Amino acid sequence: MQRVDVEEILDSDSCPAPEAKSSLQDMGRINRWFGGVATTRQMIERIAAETGRKHFSMLEVASGLGEVPGIASRQLARRGITLDVIFLDRLRSHLPIGNHTVVADALALPFADGAFDLVSSSLFAHHLAPGELAQFVHEGLRVSRVAVLINDLIRHPIHLLLAYAGWPLMRSHISRLDGVASVKRAYEPEELRKILAANVLGAEIEISRHYLFRMGAIVWKNETLAQSTWIAA
């Protein structure tokens, strides 16, 4: 199944705020029910086990309403792991209500080097062309101290059928159309690995498969990255 870069309605600045909110709420349910929250939680548990740390500051990029890091944070707290999360999105209307929010471009993060322990995203990577994806990860590594986390879909014909079958679960027509587009433009794990390995020099990359065509990628920060530059694919 070839990747098809289909434009999604939610990406458009002309998408009305009420319809965008309804679609983001649909995405929250899908993340809760079908592995989105678990994928992020398991990556953070992996990082905690590797580093021996129990507390992390985290920037959630393209966060939408922030349900994935919010629920994962509560689940992790029961395991003794705590998060301080800042939510970033390109539109104020996409963000949760609260003080810990930032409106900014994911490809030009408005933070100093090493401002956070972790930079995370969920259902964002497939929106980016390979060169943009490399740029995002390089920006994430710049402002992180430990790792960049990517939680995203896996492109697969069965997953595409499931996206159509899931239409009755969606309250928003935008979610139905964008869900199909998301699967079509998602990366396969090996594609993601090749993009990152070719463009983020010196990175240690871990990619894992999760429930119902989800993948999690941890891009560890190391000393080599301080001297590297991203190369548009």
Image (cartoon, rainbow, N blue to C red):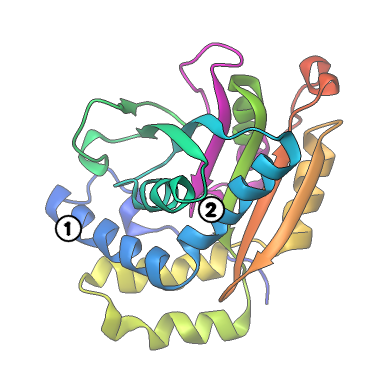
Residue 89: percent from left, percent from top? 36, 36
User: Is residue 203 rendered to the left or right of residue 71?
Assistant: right
User: Is residue 181 rendered to the left or right of residue 10?
Assistant: right
Q: Earlier in the sequence, mark 1 or mark 2?
A: 1
Between marks 1 and 2 in the image, the one whose residue lies nearer the viewer: 2
- Determine whether 72 is above or below 169 in the image: above
Give me the disc on residue 19: 1
Residue 141: percent from left, percent from top? 66, 27
- Determine whether 127 is above or below 170 in the image: above
Q: Quadrant of residue 112?
A: top right
Residue 86: percent from left, percent from top? 39, 30
- Determine whether 47 is above or below 23 in the image: above
Residue 153 lies in magenta, yes or no? no
Q: Which residue is mark 2?
A: 41
Q: Which residues are magenta?
A: 107-134
**Picture residue at 60% right of the left edge, 55% below the top:** 42
Q: Are marks 1 and 2 in contact (CB under 8 Å)?
A: no
- The N terminus lies in quadrant: bottom right
**Picture residue at 43% right of the left edge, 53% below the top:** 75
**Picture residue at 75% right of the left edge, 40% below the top:** 50
Q: What SS does tag 2 mark? A: helix
Residue 102: tell me if it is visible.
yes
The amino acid type, in three-letter code, at marker 1 is Glu
**Picture residue at 25% right of the left edge, 60% below the top:** 25
